[in-house]
Amino acid sequence: RRPPRSTPSNSSAASDVYKRQQYNKRVRDNVKANLLMALCYYHLGQKKFTEEILRRIEERHEEDPDIHELMAEIYMKIGKYERARDHILNAITIGGKRESCLRMYAEILDKMSAYRQEIKILAELISIIGENEEIILKIADLNFKIGRIKAARTLIKILEKRRYDEPELLRLKGRICYFLEDDDGAIRIFHSYLNLRKHDHEILYLLGHIYAKRGLVSEAYALINRAFHLKHQYVYLLDLIDMAIANGKLDVAEKLIRDAEQDHRNDLLIEFYRGKIAEKQNRDGSLNYRKFIAITGRFEEFYNRALSMNLSGDVTGAVLFMWQLLRLIEHVRFAIGRIIAGEIDDYSLLRDLLEAYHSTY
């Protein structure tokens, strides 16, 4: 009697499945190791190698949510926010709305200035992990950024009732006061905040602006100078030049202009300030003003950028660009006034300045 033909046992089939699982795990681990290597290259400043690793992994069409989440993190670090958003959405689609994914998605949207959408994602995050004061404060800040002042204040009151006393809450309250031109409230809150966070350049700058508005030029200059030494923002430097000229400190103004020219050699606002200095020294400033007039084309640029930011929900950014536009217009008005008063004898310059002024309307 012949023995029955052998068939693959259940244990053999299970062994094959196990081997396949182990192989897939090794592949996934290898991909993650490569992504960690890409992250290392990023920290070493080798962006080219980071992008090359990402490109190779993109070709694999991975279905692991952890891999997509890690790729989103790296793309965000190298400034490719749309690719980061695509990958974090893949991670959410494949692996569900995990806390880490929603937090990263909110961070990516913040980088993209998509504040309205970010508010929705943070609200989803709260529904998953429960109420979180840090997230509520972030939502309040985002509401402020898109101009929903009432909503921001409502959330601030909720946090105050819970005795949430983080410095960032003071910072937001002060910025709202500044935005609403409640200068007394802003001064009081900003000083309280700066006792806790003395190196916040933005708040030092805003406080300096309030003092300048009140005619306290020395105090304003000191605050904005501190802000500039903490963060070399060009707008801070322009204000320092303006105040130095107003105070008659022309040698200081000229030094600041030389500093400005190192990084902004072709910025014709510098010519405007040179014209003001020339007049203070009883020299002819019309040549500098004539160079400044070439900035006319930037009026439309500032307006378009402000409009674009406002449409994307970045009200703070829009206000900043409109402020720069108004600053340019104010400079043009100043030069027109000097010619009309007979202090600059150059009527062809007056014609050009008037054209520049009317081009803003």
Image (spheres, rainbow, N blue to C red):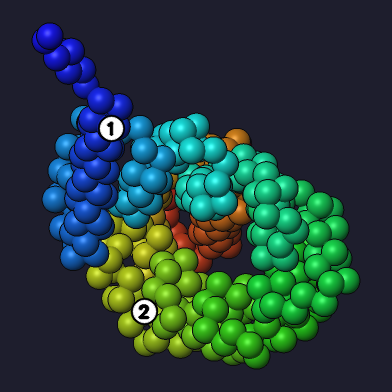
Which of discs 1 and 2 lies nearer the camera? The answer is 1
The CA distance from mark 1 to mark 2 is 81 Å
Residue 171 location in percent, x, y? 68, 73
In the image as oriented, which residue stretches furthest toward the top? 1
Q: Is residue 150 above or below residue 137?
A: above
Q: Quadrant of the N terminus?
A: top left
Q: In the picture, residue 341 is in which quadrant? A: bottom right
Please tell me the numbered disc located at residue 283.
Answer: none
User: What amino acid does circle 2 point to?
Assistant: Leu
Q: Secondary structure at mark 1?
A: helix
Label 2 packing within 10 angstroms: few (<14), some (14-19), many (20+)? some
Q: In the picture, residue 229 is in which quadrant? A: bottom left
Q: Secondary structure at mark 2?
A: helix
> Looking at the image, which residue is at 34% across and 74% down?
257
Viewer-closest of 327 and 237: 237
Which residue is tagged 2?
256
Which residue is tagged 1?
11
> Looking at the image, which residue is at 41% across and 40% down?
65
Viewer-closest of 60 and 194: 60
> Looking at the image, which residue is at 75% across and 79% down?
165
Q: Can I make out residue 345 in this image?
A: yes
Residue 7 location in percent, x, y? 21, 17
> Looking at the image, which residue is at 76% across and 49% down?
148
In the image as oriented, which residue stretches furthest toward the front? 1
Q: Can I make out residue 286 in this image?
A: no
Please report whichever mark, 1 or 2, sits nearer to the chain's N-terminal start: 1
Could you tell whether 38 is left or right of 64 in the image? left
